[in-house]
């Protein structure tokens, strides 16, 4: 059985593991129960796909969405791995093909949805095919309080006990509470070998911005990344449609997606996003876990997400190929009111509501951060880090001021009006604006009337928003969103604590945004040509473009410009099967000329040290084909024999003679020259 690093290179086209993968692969191969929490884009799927090639029996993968399963199966087949899925979306022919491969013992990975576990015949099938490992993707779906809860995930623990095989569970979104549920429900409370790989995604640039003409902000962000695949998340279904229309009118290829659409319409959008370069999908979070597109270059939130876990899962869909990606999250006071109200008006018990408010607080703290966002985000997940240099606050230090006095004035106004009003009326009181409502309530007589004239109405709106962000005040749903003070605000009100706020200077877009490019101007035409070739293959095979090669692979081709198949084999993501299928075609694009044909035997050695040895053996054989004097009877070795010599590297003439195809005459003529080449390496 080949070793893991060899399979990693020859099958998947990667020269090294990503951080943390090797240890997880070793544990899974050894048959230990495993729980791995890895960031989106950290390479979770490889941690069960690679062991499946090294273990006896079939690896059964429980995965939540048909689209996700189909994508992984397609990608595995392109890499030369026998995989199949049993889903409700299969044609009869597809299902028959899967069963045929199970019967003849060639299938290595079998994907199925958790709902299939309810079928009485599933356990019988999995026993018959000698299941050797269960892999659970998106394992957080077992958590009954998670937003992705799937009841049938609760059957997986029972399946593990019935088959008595190891189980490896993977997820990117599991806080301590969710991890506890996974251990209880999948492993019967017995602690599996747990890998908590860092949550950091250093290739993702994070940015937040207060809403100021939010449609224009989203359009500017998209315009600066024209031609790149992106997602825009919205809080409402209606907004997905209006924003997608606006993007289309601005010259982008965009479509909308939400849970209220017909199933066929959703499938069309999913298929387009997977296959088309540069498509923007404007969606609710319904467009979520099924995305297995590695080259999404940007994600924007037109509205504040529900929680910090939701935020990180959604922005984590960008840059899964490891190449640079960018995110922007817009937020405003109305977003905060909406998210607070959703928690307060929900049906969850009191302790769950408190936990949900805490998660929202963490996200608001990230939005209103005064220093490196990544530090704050990773701290929430229990990781310490240095300033990242790849977020908006590291790019440009925020303009902050001592907001203690302003906050105390605002709190005073809230308390003196019996916590019955929102930001608009409170601002009128603070700046001394005698409105009809102020006169009606005699609020011009309050000590706080006019004490905030030093700040503009816009500045007070920012103060109230940041007070909500710091959880000093909350909108009260029973009083139509009126602000009430929290316990966290009392030390500031009493003068026992201070607070710094960001000075919101609304920056109008005075110039066209700087266009973000994936490669240098010099390499851009070649990258476009490589993408066109990829698109042609993808359309011909009716598969997503990234199944052929990811953006990251094409970018590396454009920058490194390999000039031989051996050099092409060194490009990240070009495994043996893909080199055989596509290497010559993409090399021809790079060279701008036909690629010299290689014998199939030599092509199989492309990118390996034995390929160079093979070439030198072939040259030596040609030079000696009629002997040293050039007058002897013609002799030659077959390509297969030369390959065997290059791979096994015999050390003496006796070992060389044992190679199939080498007779006494060939050893006598070629042996000394061959051994000299082999000694040189």
Image: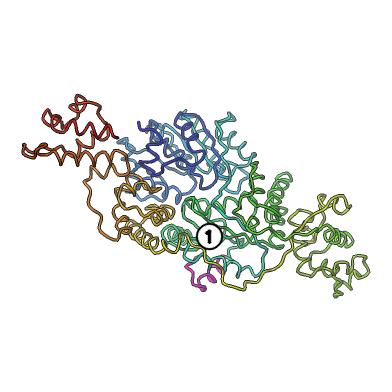
Q: Quadrant of residue 678?
A: top left
Which is more toward the observer, 323 or 143? 323
**Residue 650 horizontal side relative to residue 183, left or right:** left
The residue drawn where x is 42% and y is 50% is 71
Residue 186 position (above or below residue 481):
above
Judged from this view, the residue extending furthest toward the front is 629
For the point 84% across and 68% down, the residue is: 454
Relative to 327, say whether 223 is above or below.
Answer: below
The reply, left or right, for residue 5 in relation to residue 249 is left
Q: Is residue 345 above or below residue 450?
A: above
**Magenta residues, as a range?**
240-254
Please give the residue where the numbered disc 1 appears in the rendered image.
231
Task: Label 1, secondary structure: give it.
Answer: strand
Q: Main secondary structure of the magenta part?
A: helix
Residue 245 vs residue 651: left or right?
right
Residue 334 in view in this figure? yes
Q: Residue at x 85, y 59 (%)?
A: 405
Quarter of the image that includes the N terminus: top left
Question: Which residue is located at x 23 percent, y 40 percent?
Answer: 616
Q: Is residue 253 magenta?
A: yes
User: Which quarter of the picture shows residue 519?
Assistant: bottom left
Q: Is residue 312 magenta?
A: no
């Amino acid at each position: 059985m080949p070793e893991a690093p060899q399979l990693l290179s020859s099958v998947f086209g990667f020269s090294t593991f990503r951080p943390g993968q090797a240890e997880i692969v070793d544990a899974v191969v050894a048959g230990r129960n495993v729980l791995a929490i890895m960031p989106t884009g950290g390479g979770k799927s490889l941690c069960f796909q690679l062991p499946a090639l090294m273990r006896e029996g079939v690896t059964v993968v429980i995965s939540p969405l048909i689209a996700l399963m189909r994508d992984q199966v397609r990608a595995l087949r392109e890499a030369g791995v026998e995989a199949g899925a049993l889903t409700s979306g299969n044609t009869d022919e597809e299902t028959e093909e899967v069963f045929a491969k199970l019967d003849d013992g060639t299938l290595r990975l079998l994907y199925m949805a958790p709902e299939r576990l309810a079928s009485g015949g599933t356990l019988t099938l999995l026993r018959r095919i000698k299941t050797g490992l269960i892999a659970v993707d998106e394992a957080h779906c077992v958590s009954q309080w998670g937003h992705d809860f799937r009841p049938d995930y609760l059957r997986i623990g029972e399946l593990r006990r019935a088959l008595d095989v190891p189980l490896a569970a993977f997820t990117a979104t599991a806080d301590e509470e969710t991890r506890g549920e996974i251990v209880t429900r999948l492993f019967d409370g017995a602690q599996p070998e747990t890998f908590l790989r860092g949550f950091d995604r250093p290739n993702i640039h994070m940015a937040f911005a207060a809403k100021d003409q939010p449609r224009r902000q989203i359009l500017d962000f998209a315009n600066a990344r024209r031609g790149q695949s992106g997602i825009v998340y919205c809080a409402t279904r209606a907004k997905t449609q209006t924003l997608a229309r606006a993007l289309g009118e601005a010259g982008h290829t965009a479509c909308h997606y939400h849970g209220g659409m017909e199933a066929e319409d959703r499938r069309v959008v999913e298929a387009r996003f997977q296959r088309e370069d540069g498509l923007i999908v404007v969606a609710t979070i319904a467009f979520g876990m099924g995305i297995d597109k590695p080259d999404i270059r940007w994600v924007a939130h037109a509205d504040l997400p529900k929680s910090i876990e939701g935020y990180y899962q959604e922005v984590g869909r960008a840059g899964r190929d490891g190449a640079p990606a960018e995110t922007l999250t817009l937020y405003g006071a109305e977003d905060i009111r909406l998210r607070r109200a959703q928690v307060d008006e929900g049906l969850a018990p009191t302790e769950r509501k408190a936990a949900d408010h805490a998660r929202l607080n963490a996200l608001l703290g990230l939005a209103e951060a005064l220093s490196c966002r990544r530090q704050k985000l990773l701290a929430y997940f229990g990781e310490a880090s240095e300033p990242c240099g790849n977020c908006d606050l590291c790019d440009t230090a925020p303009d902050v001021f001592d907001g203690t006095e302003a906050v105390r004035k605002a709190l005073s106004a809230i308390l003196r009006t019996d916590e019955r009003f929102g930001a608009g009326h409170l601002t009128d009181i603070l700046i001394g604006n005698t409105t009809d409502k102020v006169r009606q309530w005699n609020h011009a007589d309050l000590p706080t009337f006019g004490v905030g004239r030093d700040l503009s109405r816009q500045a007070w709106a920012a103060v109230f928003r940041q007070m909500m962000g710091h959880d000093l005040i909350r909108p009260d749903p029973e009083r139509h969103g009126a602000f009430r003070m929290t316990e966290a605000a009392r030390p500031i009100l009493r003068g026992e604590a201070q607070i710094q706020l960001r000075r919101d200077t609304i920056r109008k877009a005075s110039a066209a945004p700087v266009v973000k490019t994936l490669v240098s101007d010099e390499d851009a035409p070649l990258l476009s040509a490589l993408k066109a070739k990829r698109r042609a293959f993808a359309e011909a095979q009716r598969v997503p473009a990234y199944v052929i090669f990811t953006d990251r692979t094409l970018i590396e081709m454009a920058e490194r410009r390999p000039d031989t198949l051996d050099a092409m084999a060194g490009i990240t993501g070009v495994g043996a099967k893909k080199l055989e299928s596509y290497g010559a075609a993409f090399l021809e694009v790079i060279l701008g000329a036909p690629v010299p044909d290689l014998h199939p035997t030599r092509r199989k050695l492309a990118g390996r040290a034995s390929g160079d040895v093979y070439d030198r053996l072939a040259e030596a054989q040609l030079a000696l084909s009629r002997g040293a004097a050039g007058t002897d009877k013609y002799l030659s070795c077959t390509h297969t024999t030369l390959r065997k010599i290059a791979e096994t590297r015999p050390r003496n003439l006796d070992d060389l003679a044992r190679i199939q195809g080498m007779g006494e005459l060939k050893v006598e003529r070629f042996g000394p020259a061959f051994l000299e080449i082999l000694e040189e390496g």
